[in-house]
Amino acid sequence: MPPPLAKPATPEPAAPETVAPGSVTTGSNDSDDGSLAAAYGATSANSGLVPLTLARRSPQADDVEIAIEFCGLCHSDVHAVRGEWGGQAWPLVPGHEIVGTVSRVGAAVTDFAPGDRVGVGCIVDSCRECESCLDGLEQYCENGMTGTYGAADRRNGDAITQGGYSSSIVVDRRYVLRVPDSLDPKAVAPLLCAGVTTYSPLRHFDVEEGDVVGVVGLGGLGHMAVKLAKAMGARVVVFTTSESKVPAALELGADEVVLSRDEAAMDAANRTIDLIIDTVAAPHDLNPLFRTLRVDGALFQLGLPSEAMPPVNPRALIRRRIAYAGSLIGGIAETQEMLDFCAQHGVVADIEVVRAEQLNEAYDRMVAGDVKYRFVLDTSTLRAPAEEADA
Ligand code: NAP
Ligand code: ZN
Ligand code: ZN
């Protein structure tokens, strides 16, 4: 999501003035008809996740109101909730891997109807006018996309957006995705961020049969990269720091697994890879990875560690015409394309469903690398919202 996937679109926006501890408002334009949502969120970088009540706006003409069923837990949520990216408004309800069913639609919405199964990823608005938006690259909106949480919502009074660890959300129809019926909704949720974030660079590189794709870090993003690259026909090599993940990586479909801290194994992988998708959430040295690339290879860095990375050695890039790139999630049309691709190939995430009261423990486990491969919150376990939001 918003690079920082949850960072406000405008620098350091103040939290809504009226917010009192334990409640959050999300900019209802029509408070008569707005609704309250049960949620879990953080009130500071040290609070962990606690129960909150959100006031969601009533659906405006172009809005879709969604009863959320499931929401994936992305490592970006952890970075944001723990204040690792800075510039964060509190309180913050994270979550940008949202799946649910439409409960109400605005008067101008003709493409969604109550009961439809839908998804929302990391983007809930963008300027819709700049070159990037017109090209379907809303994530690179020149005026700043509006992230699903922690961003100033420019069309809704600059209220701070609040995400999917909640029972409902209201989103403009242009940013709502259709979830194919054939896929298990709880295992689809992680596709909305982890799926599209790895699909986009694989497509950008035009991965096809015969290509060799390296996937670094076998977490939420990494395991989706393995499944998607395999579905595109590539040979997949996983680079992991965790010896314990070797059998699991092979089970997922990897053709080969390399322990990235084993120098001899890294040497043996010299000049064998066409494209590396690097999903590591912590600072790490990229230079040994560059040596595994062939001429004209590329490394896409997707992880956004909060601390500086060791310097890249330009020699490693120059000697093989290697491209070192970054990539941010994917646009709305591409996210739909990814969902349809997953339906066609039967691809979903491997998940562990958690209850609301397990969220903090799930975060610790994610940081410790103890997850196969994505936690998904079952929002039916959220406690009922307070009778009214206190703001
Ligand atoms: P995750 O599920 O926690 O997986 C990250 C993996 O990185 C771990 O499973 C581990 O894999 C590896 N790793 C963690 N610490 C490491 C260390 N100290 N040294 C080496 N490897 C380490 O996280 P995720 O949800 O996939 O997210 C990964 C990163 O991508 C995060 O920084 C997140 O913010 C970012 N992200 C970016 C975008 C984007 O648009 N660019 C979108 C979503 C998320 P092994 O055990 O296999 O080594
Ligand atoms: Zn994410
Ligand atoms: Zn734009």
Image (spheres, helix red, strand yellow):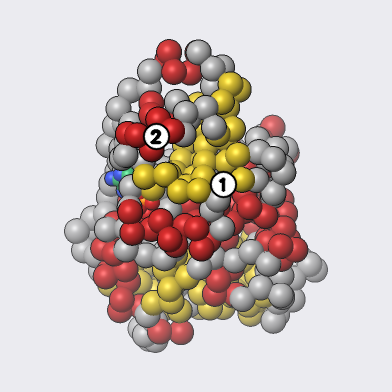
Q: Residue at x 27, y 50 (%)?
A: 83
Q: Quadrant of the C terminus?
A: bottom left
Can residue 386 be seen in this snapshot? yes
Within 8 Å: ligand 1 and the Cβ of disc 1? no
Can residue 16 be seen in this snapshot? no
Local SS, label 1: strand
- Residue 325: x and y in percent read 52, 29
Vertical order, 35 against 164 (above or below): below
On residue 367, which mark appears?
none
The residue wearing badge 1 is 236
Q: In this rendered view, identify the residue nearer to me: 375 or 111.
A: 375
- Looking at the rendered structure, the kind of residue marked 1 is Val
Q: Residue at x 55, y 34 (%)?
A: 273
- Residue 60: x and y in percent read 64, 66
Q: In this rendered view, identify the residue nearer to me: 200 or 38.
A: 200
Using the numbered discs, state the Cα–Cα distance from disc 2 to disc 1 in whole angstroms: 15 Å
- Residue 86: x and y in percent read 29, 43
Q: Earlier in the sequence, mark 2 or mark 1?
A: 1
Q: Residue at x 59, y 66 (%)?
A: 348
Vertical order, 222 against 101 (above or below): above
Q: Residue furthest left?
A: 46
On residue 266, which mark appears?
2
- Looking at the rendered structure, the kind of residue marked 2 is Met
Q: In this rendered view, identify the residue nearer to me: 25 or 47.
A: 47
Vertical order, 107 against 255 (above or below): below
